[in-house]
């Protein structure tokens, strides 16, 4: 019997039933591992599996001698791109892009509204028991938001921002996107032209050679002092030192960072003390929302059905590009 190994800790009975049903139909048996406690057991048995799904530790990959397809339960796969990790060069990698749009876009809306409505200042007052009125506040309505990344997360975010009255410019490698909520979509080479009129810049980018340092010191300097920076992709996309300097010197209105370099952020890092800055520990996605878990499983089951029919997974990743 062909075998699938599932290594994660977010599945409920309904999720397992969906995986089991898809596996049986495709001619597979499934073994489940709890990623909180079954790593050693997986390491001992990993050579049995044609397919693996979940949050596989990269250090175990070399032992997966029968592996033909790894489906990562995450959207980001930068930790799995090194060819030296893989038992064979023909192993396929897919991700779970498509599962995280709802939860991460809601996080983006939350922190952007907090910044626009001056919640970091109210939170500081709360700690000191000060009753203060902070005016003026700002609105998403009428704002111009520049979204770096127009995929699943960027598209979900554009729809929500558009519904609240924002103008949304997408920026991506190709300069094209199918999502109609974008008012315009530009190639990365034209990013500098829109930064000076941005009320907020939102980064939803994978970690690749092309995205590293994309929001550079020079580009941060192009932003108006009223602009906010929100990052939910990877910390490597921003020059953090330049961002911290701009925040401390009030050359930016504020920032909300869910991803940083390094993670966890050291307690003495300058970002902790920057004004009007919201820091969250890489929680905009993950599996804290039940809908995300369900979508993640559905994406895997859809691709498993394709695999059983002799077709390739839809969410394949080009390991050379990183997405």
Image (cartoon, grey):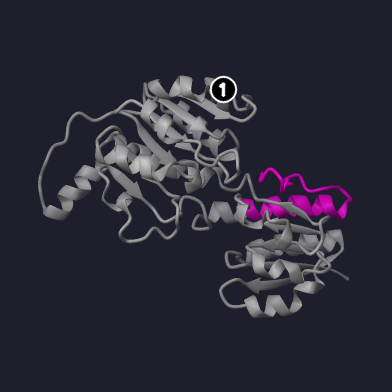
Q: Residues within 10 Å of mark 1 (few under 14, many from 20)?
A: some
Is residue 199 visible in the rendered image? The answer is no
Per the rendered image, the range of residues in magenta is: 295-323
Q: Indicate yes or no whether the magenta region holds residue 44.
A: no
Q: From the image, which quarter does the C terminus lie in? A: top right
What residue is pinned by disc 1?
Answer: 186
* Rendered residue at 39%/22% (across/down): 196
In percent of width and height, residue 64 lies at 77, 69
The quarter of the picture where residue 45 lies is bottom right
Label 1: which secondary element: strand
Is residue 4 visible in the rendered image? The answer is yes
The quarter of the picture where residue 61 lies is bottom right
In percent of width and height, residue 111 lies at 36, 42
For residue 243, side relative to residue 63 (left or right): left
Q: Relative to residue 312, is residue 193 depicted above or below?
A: above
Q: Indicate yes or no whether the magenta region holds residue 317.
A: yes
For residue 216, side relative to residue 97 (left or right): left
Count of marks, rendered view: 1
């Amino acid at each position: 019997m062909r075998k699938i190994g599932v290594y994660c800790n977010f599945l409920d009975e309904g999720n397992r039933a969906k995986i089991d049903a898809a596996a049986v139909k495709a001619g597979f048996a499934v073994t489940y591992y709890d990623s909180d406690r079954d790593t050693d057991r997986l390491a001992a048995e990993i050579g049995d599996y044609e397919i693996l799904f979940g949050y596989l530790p990269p250090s175990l990959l070399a032992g997966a001698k029968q592996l033909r397809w790894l489906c990562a339960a995450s959207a980001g796969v930068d930790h799995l791109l090194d060819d030296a990790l893989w038992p064979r060069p023909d192993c396929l990698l897919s991700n779970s892009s498509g599962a995280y749009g709802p939860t991460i876009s809601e996080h983006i809306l939350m922190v952007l509204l907090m910044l626009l409505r001056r919640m970091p200042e109210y939170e500081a007052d709360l700690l000191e028991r000060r009753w203060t009125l902070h005016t003026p506040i700002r609105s998403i309505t009428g704002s111009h938001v520049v979204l770096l990344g127009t995929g699943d997360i960027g598209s979900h975010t554009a729809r929500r921002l558009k519904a609240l009255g924002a103008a949304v410019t997408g920026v991506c490698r190709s300069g094209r996107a199918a999502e109609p909520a974008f008012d315009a979509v530009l190639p990365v080479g034209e990013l500098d032209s829109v930064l000076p009129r941005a009320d907020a810049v939102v980064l939803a980018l994978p970690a690749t050679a092309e995205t590293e340092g994309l929001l550079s010191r020079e580009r941060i300097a192009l932003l108006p002092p009223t602009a906010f920076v929100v990052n939910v992709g990877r910390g490597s996309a921003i020059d953090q030192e330049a961002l911290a300097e701009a925040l401390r010197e009030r050359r930016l209105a504020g920032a909300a960072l869910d991803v940083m370099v390094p993670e966890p952020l050291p307690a003495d890092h300058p970002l902790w003390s920057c004004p009007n800055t919201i820091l969250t520990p890489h929680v905009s996605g993950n599996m804290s929302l039940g809908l995300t878990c369900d979508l993640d499983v559905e994406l895997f089951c859809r691709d498993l059905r394709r695999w059983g029919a002799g077709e390739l997974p839809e969410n394949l990743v080009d390991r050379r590009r990183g997405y």
